[in-house]
Amino acid sequence: MINEKALEIYQDYKGCWIVASHSRARGYPQFARNGKRKLIHRYMYEKYYGNIPVGILVCHKCDTKACVNPNHLFLGTHRDNAIDALKKGRLAIGENHPDAKLSEQQVREIRIAEGTNKDIGIKYKVSETIVSFIRNKKRWKHLA
């Protein structure tokens, strides 16, 4: 059990309960007990709502990693969390992704281009595998 009185928590303007004084794992407050680390938002979810099934995430409605308000937490899969992020505009996709090598216009051109995947890949400086994925709509799925 965590010593909740030792937590330094303040409420922000969105109603988030922000943990201010604990170590963080990728922005999520955590504590250690018996040599094991536990994320505080997962602890708070379990305290208020019960066990978390194996492989399930505790997601934030408020999108604030340091928030531990149980009313802002919900269970979901990695897919649920990604869909939530996409709907809220928090997921970088397409040419907005930092690793994108192509523009949306180039992807549209690749989809209608004549020639082999290898030749098209050389023209656009990407692998023939990427060209295949684009043409088969396994990549850049958000484009029509």
Image: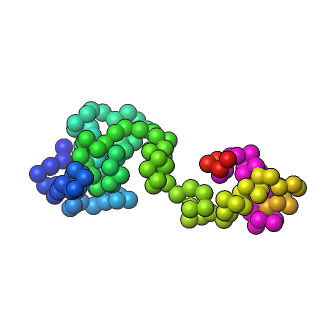
- Along the line of sight, which residue is nearer the eye, 106 or 30? 106
- What's the residue at 66%, 63% (across, down)? 103
Question: Image check: 80 left or right of 101?
Answer: left
Q: Which residue is situated farthest in the left direction here?
A: 5
Residue 109 visible from this viewpoint: yes
Question: Image check: 47 left or right of 76?
Answer: left
Question: Image check: 74 left or right of 143?
Answer: left
- What's the residue at 38%, 59% (across, down)? 26
| Residue 83 higher or lower than 19, as above or below | above
* Res 45 → quadrant: top left
Query: In which quadrant of the rendered image does the N terminus lie?
Result: top left
- Along the line of sight, which residue is nearer the eye, 132 or 8? 132
Question: Image check: 37 left or right of 83?
Answer: left
> Where's residue 82, x and y in %?
48, 46
> Where's residue 85, x and y in %?
45, 49
- Along the line of sight, which residue is nearer the eye, 29 or 1? 29
Number of labels in the image equals: 0
Please, which colouring scheme is shown? rainbow
> Where's residue 52, x and y in %?
34, 35
- What's the residue at 34%, 47% (across, down)? 60
Residue 129 visible from this viewpoint: no
| Residue 94 higher or lower than 48, as above or below | below
Q: Which residues are magenta?
A: 122-140
| Residue 63 higher or lower than 70, as above or below | below
- What's the residue at 31%, 42% (across, down)? 73
- Residue 89 is covered by the magenta coloring: no
- Along the line of sight, which residue is nearer the eye, 122 or 30? 122
> Where's residue 69, x and y in %?
23, 46
